[in-house]
Amino acid sequence: MKALLQRVTGAQVSVDGEGVGRIARGLVVLVAVASGDTKEDADYLVEKITNLRIFEDEQGKLNLSALDTRAELLLVSQFTLLADTRKGRRPSFTDAAPLDIAQGLFEYFVECTRPCGLRVQTGRFQQHMLVEIHNDGPVTIMIDSRDRFRPRG
């Protein structure tokens, strides 16, 4: 699974002109489910996203997590994070999980974030969404659950 985190001062998502999710200060998390991803990948992302220190402390250093700051989360499914652009001019999405698996793992991911005590909002799976993001910093970070198996260095 991949997650693109954007620290925001506010964000909202709408479908067909209807607001379906809105947050104040927090994180917009765009999430993609790849073939072969499991619940362990989702669990890893939830732990990493909620504890990653990307909010500023009193000295302006990135020392605080979403949990520390009581940040809000806007979770949006985004299979295009899996685009393979190595060949040609049209991205390939063959690494994306089949629809039913992707939807199930995305819903599992959302449900795993709720016990953290943060306010959680979502977009709508497999819908055309308009996402308005007020990126703060800007701070934008990509997390790939498969990277946990790679050695550092």
Image (cartoon, helix red, strand yellow):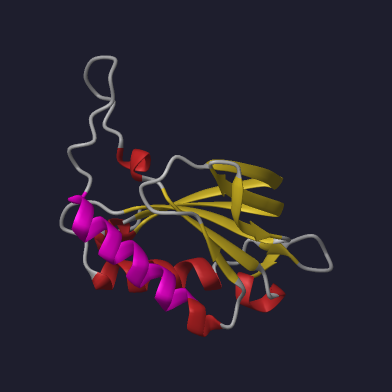
Q: Is residue 13 above or below residue 93?
A: below
Determine the residue located farthest toward the top in the rendered image.
Answer: 89
Q: Nearer the viewer, residue 93 or 53?
A: 93
- In screen coordinates, is 134 left or right of 6? right
The x and y percentages for residue 11 are 67, 51
Horizontally, is 136 left or right of 152 in the view? right
Give percent across and percent down for residue 119. Answer: 62, 73
What is the quadrant of residue 36 in the picture? bottom left
* Residue 79 locus on image (x, y percent): 33, 44
Tally of marks: 0
What secondary structure do most residues of the magenta stretch adopt?
helix
Extreme residue in the right direction: 58
Q: Which residues are magenta?
A: 97-113
- Residue placed at 22% from the left, 51% from the top? 99
Give x and y (percent) for residue 34. Answer: 24, 51
Task: Kindly identify the residue that appears in the image at 67 percent across and 69 percent down.
Answer: 71
Residue 152, placed above or below residue 45 = above
Q: Quadrant of the N terminus?
A: bottom left
Quadrant location of residue 80? Answer: top left
Of residues 62 and 114, which is closer to you in this image?
114
Residue drawn at (58%, 47%), measured in percent from left and top? 14
* Residue at screen point 83% across, 65% down: 59
| Residue 108 is one of the magenta-drawn residues | yes
Q: Is residue 88 magenta?
A: no
Snapshot quadrant of residue 89: top left
**Is 71 left or right of 151, judged from the image as shown?**
right
